[in-house]
Image (tube, rainbow, N blue to C red):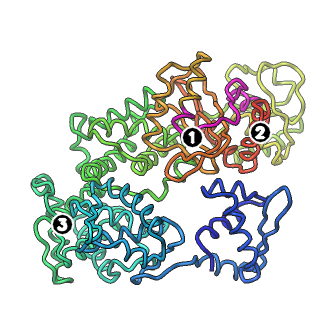
Amino acid sequence: MLTKRQKDILSFLIQNNEPITSEWIAKELGVSDRTVRTELKELQSQCQSLGIYIESIRGKGYKLEIIDSQLFKEAYDSARNEIVDGSKMDFSEQNGRVVYILKRLLLEREPIKLEHLEDELFVSKPTIQSDLKTVREILEKYKLKLVTRPHYGTIVEGEEYMKRLCFSNYILSRNNDLNVDFSSFTVLDQRLFRKIKEIIIKKVNEYKIEISDIALENLATHIAIACKRIKEGFVIENLDPDVTGKHPLEKIVAEEIVKGVEEFTSLTFPRSEIDYIIVHLLGTKLIHKETLNRFSEFDELGTIIQCMLKRLKTELNWDFYEDTEFIQALTLHIRPAMNRLRYNMNIRNPLLNEIKTRYPSAFEGAVIASKCIENHLGMEVGEHEIAYIALHIGVALERLKTRQKKAKRVIIVCASGVGSAKLLLYRLQNAFKEEIEVVASTNYYQLRDYDLSSIDFVISTIPINDDIGVPVQVVNTFLDEEDINNIRKKLSPMKSDEKEKYLDESRVFVQKDFRDKESVINFMCNELYKQGLVSKGYVNLVLERESIAPTNFGNLVAIPHPLTPETEETFWTVCTLKRPIEWHGKHKVQLVCLLNIKKGPTGDLDRMYQKLIAILEDKSIVRKVIKSESAKEIVEILNT
């Protein structure tokens, strides 16, 4: 059977068509090179039973070949798990042990002795103590304390409300859609959970209320947790005393949901538990669309949205003031988002990493916009909430591009007659639809009679040697794929030196020795300050942006940048490190690309982001850059 670490190693080998070194895998996993080689040796001994072959290529690394795909899938899908208390957990890694310890501590009435945890997890006392340090850090996020009483054991102290939030966020495993994965945990009653969902769906339909699938799943989860805790004698206390009076609609819905749950479970929900459900209803998109017209710029929501629109226009030159669809979408989203923040309810966004990678410009816009909420509430928004705002900004940007996209005016020159010209016209219209507008078609000798002042370019089936003052694209009469690609380049011209303009050897720093991200960022910003490219306070803008949402990208890469654009031009500053450092959590980084964005109108940021990400997603390029010993070589690699 495979351990989690062995699965991770196999995952890296699967993702790479070329050999990958044990050193690289070790950096990604945050373990020693020796550990990875030991695991690889063990995997090689199991190759036949796993349906694979792992080839060790001298000087290049390891390469995986799958011999029997069905056998490999079965082995890969089942990691080495220990079954304790009916729960399927992987105790070979710290994360599995931490989740199990949290579960035991949050659900127990009495203190737990460390010796019992040692026996249950089959680990040593120092290992348990190391795990408890991580447990303490998690509990502190929820204002919970881990208290040890001599001769009695260890217990969690704090508000029941916070215990339940911690329980939901850390104990309940979710699948890729963020639905509760009952195969991984038996803490909740699956039959009860499904019944609660039925009750919620019935009530939201009855009151014509909109609620997303994820919000439905979260609400059902919290009510199921409430049932379990009430049954065990743990009741919510000290919630907002006026929550009922402030939110009459949510009060009615909560009471009717509770009535249905009480009938099914024979439990009695005290008033404080109904308030608890009201709080979670406030964290969903429970709002009638008809009520949107009641919001004005003087309301709390209106003020925040106006702030967002202003910041996006001022700092990124994105004008969404007339985009009523965007404003409505924000209004629907921000009200529950602010309630979630007020009541410390963390939301998970299953698309977070994909949004950061695929829509980096929209995500940066969301970071800037989220400062309006942060300033209003006096609390951090968090990258999961920011990613949801980024989705709305991404949609608005697409609409903006569509409105701004003006068809190119074109004249067709065809020497072989009207029939050929018509054929070419229809082929162009089919290939480019609204991107080009064919103004006329003519013979070459008649071209001089046309006023070309409003023409963007000429498409001709014959070479035109005269300088007519307008770009000419020569194509085949039947317009093949190469012709289409050449015209597309004319529609979206890209300078051949586009990569080069972002890079300069004076802003590439090689094999530096730093222990943390703050040191790297300080060094890079200070170097730019010495070159007169940024202000002295530039580093604070970069660190502030980093504190909102970490910029580690995976693949040992981080892309820090300032919260707001400041430089005169857009350019990259690159720094490679002698050894990987921890950037966020356990994510390692050895290549740092500081992104400096031009202030004022930003141009096509998306294209620049996509270009950068395409480079840094390529493991072979990143490996070459990290190993490089000279700035000149790095510039050449990144410009290849």
Residue 621 seen anywhere in this rendered image of the structure: yes
Residue 512 falls within the magenta-colored stretch: yes
Disc 1 marks a residue whose amino acid type is: Arg
Q: Which residue is mark 2?
A: 628
Instruction: Give, as a three-letter code, the residue at label 2.
Output: Ser
Q: CA distance from mark 2 to mark 3?
A: 61 Å
How far from the left and from the top, in percent, is residue 273? 16, 67
Looking at the rendered image, the disc whose residue lies closer to the viewer, 3 or 1, is 1
Spot occupied by residue 631 in the image (x, y as percentages of width and height): 75, 30
Amino acid residing under circle 3: Ala
Q: Residue at x 59, y 37 (%)?
A: 514
Residue 618 position in % (x across, y down): 71, 49
What residue appears at the point 85 percent right and 62 percent down from the top-left corner? 57
Numbered circle sitting on residue 254: 3
Q: Which residue is the site of mark 1?
A: 515
Tell me the quarter of the image containing the C terminus. top right
Q: Is residue 498 left or right of residue 198?
A: right
Q: Which residues are magenta?
A: 496-521
